[in-house]
Image (tube, rainbow, N blue to C red):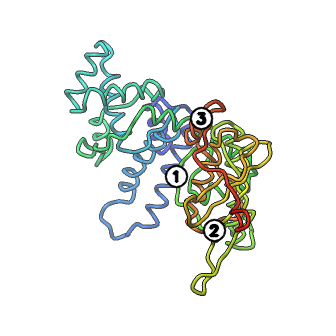
């Protein structure tokens, strides 16, 4: 019966024969977890609970792994299925007539329906999407119209997510398997299928990797993040900058040591001589450029470094590599370069004054 139901599901949603085993596995996993919590005195049979829950998880399998792009929320997927089922069930009507029909039957706005249809076609969702009414006949308690309330699907967002996944997958494959596992388990995301799960603690990861303890995993995770960020830079997905603290001046106020200034060298991703920037905790100029990095003619990186230091909130990390979204760098070039940060001038002595 399990084989028959899995095959029927695959045929209905135009999946491939290779998906049959995955669909069966989802059912068995759902059955197992339902069994662990099942009360034997419950008058409702265990399989009734399992069948209902398994169908929704199997639909999630399609939503998250079986298309060029995935729909980020269940509600968004239910909306997409409902719209595409009407659209695909009326091939004799023109596109305009089909959209008008969908507006009438769902109550959705025309703009939203147009966007959902574009997503369905652009990402090649299975044409076997079936109407909600058919779901209700097969599954007791299927999603009703009242539960469709989250208009969160955007074609631009989906295409962008698809692009991000490709870059993240490549970057994750370029770091060591142990680093990839640390990132995956600590974040709760699979870098192969981008499924989401409960993140593991450092202690749990240490146990899986045979590490000495939580501190070891915490340190390795920081290193893995930097490696991952550098791979994203190498792929052209983002930019980056390395910071290294080179000096810190402390003063004593009211019997307590306080930071008066801290100096960082910074190096944009790639080769080249580093630049330097000083942060003063008080005074007119909180940030000043000591020298621009070789590959920072415009001062854009120096400005972003100031932003990073500002967000440290006084912790002043010793050394770290930061990824920078491409759109976050100032839109400047050599011709219009006017770094907003002033250049550093050493305080003059009394004699110099």
Measure the C-alpha gap from mark 1 to mark 3. 39 Å
Q: Is residue 181 left or right of residue 11?
A: right
The residue beneath circle 2 is: 202
- Vertical arrangement, residue 352 with respect to residue 118, above or below: below
- Vertical arrangement, residue 236 with respect to residue 292, above or below: above
Q: Is residue 309 left or right of residue 49?
A: right
Name the quadrant containing residue 338: top right
Q: Please give the count of numbered marks on the rendered protein.
A: 3
Looking at the figure, which quarter contains the C terminus? Answer: bottom right
Q: Which label number is shown at residue 129? A: none
* Crowdedness near tag 1: few (<14), some (14–19) or many (≥20) residues, C-alpha within 10 Å: few
For mark 1, give the secondary structure.
Answer: loop
Please state which of residues 281 and 310 is positioned toward the viewer in this rendering. 281
For mark 3, give the secondary structure.
Answer: loop
Measure the C-alpha gap from mark 3 to mark 2. 42 Å
* Crowdedness near tag 2: few (<14), some (14–19) or many (≥20) residues, C-alpha within 10 Å: many
The residue beneath circle 3 is: 332
Mark nearer the viewer, 1 or 2: 2
Measured as percent of width and height from the top left, residue 92 is found at 30, 12
For mark 2, give the secondary structure.
Answer: helix
The residue beneath circle 1 is: 196
- Taking the spot 59% from the left edge, 39% from the top edge, the residue there is 326
Measured as percent of width and height from the top left, residue 251 is found at 65, 77
């Amino acid at each position: 019966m399990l084989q028959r139901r899995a095959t029927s599901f695959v045929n209905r949603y135009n999946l491939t024969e290779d998906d049959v085993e995955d669909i069966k596995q989802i059912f068995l996993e759902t059955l197992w977890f339902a069994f662990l919590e099942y009360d034997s005195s419950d008058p409702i049979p265990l399989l009734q609970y399992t069948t209902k829950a398994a169908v929704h998880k199997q639909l999630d399998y399609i939503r998250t792994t079986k298309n060029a792009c995935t729909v980020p929320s269940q509600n968004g997927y239910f909306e997409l299925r409902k719209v595409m089922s009407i659209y695909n069930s009326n091939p004799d009507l023109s596109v305009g007539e089909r959209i008008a029909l969908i507006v009438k039957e769902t109550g959705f706005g025309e703009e939203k329906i147009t966007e959902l249809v574009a997503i369905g076609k652009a990402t090649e969702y299975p044409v076997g999407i079936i109407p909600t009414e058919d779901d209700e006949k097969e599954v007791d308690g299927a999603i009703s119209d009242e539960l469709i309330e989250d208009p969160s699907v955007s074609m631009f967002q989906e295409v962008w997510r698809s692009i991000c996944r490709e870059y993240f997958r490549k970057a994750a494959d370029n770091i060591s398997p142990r680093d990839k596992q640390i990132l995956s388990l600590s974040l709760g995301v699979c870098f192969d299928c981008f499924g989401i799960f409960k993140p593991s603690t450092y202690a749990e990861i240490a146990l899986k990797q045979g590490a000495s303890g939580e501190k070891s995993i915490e340190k390795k995770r920081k290193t893995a993040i930097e490696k991952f960020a550098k791979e994203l830079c190498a792929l052209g997905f983002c930019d980056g900058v390395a910071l290294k603290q080179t000096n810190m001046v402390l003063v004593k106020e009211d019997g307590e040591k306080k930071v008066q200034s801290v100096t960082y060298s910074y190096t944009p991703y790639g080769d080249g001589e580093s630049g330097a920037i000083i942060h003063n905790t008080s005074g007119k100029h909180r940030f000043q450029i000591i020298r621009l990095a070789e590959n920072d003619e415009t001062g854009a990186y120096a400005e972003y470094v100031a932003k990073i230091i500002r967000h440290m909130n006084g912790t002043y990390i010793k050394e770290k590599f930061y990824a920078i979204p491409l759109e976050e760098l100032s839109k400047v070039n050599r011709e219009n370069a006017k770094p907003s940060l002033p250049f550093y001038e050493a305080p003059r002595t009394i004699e110099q004054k």
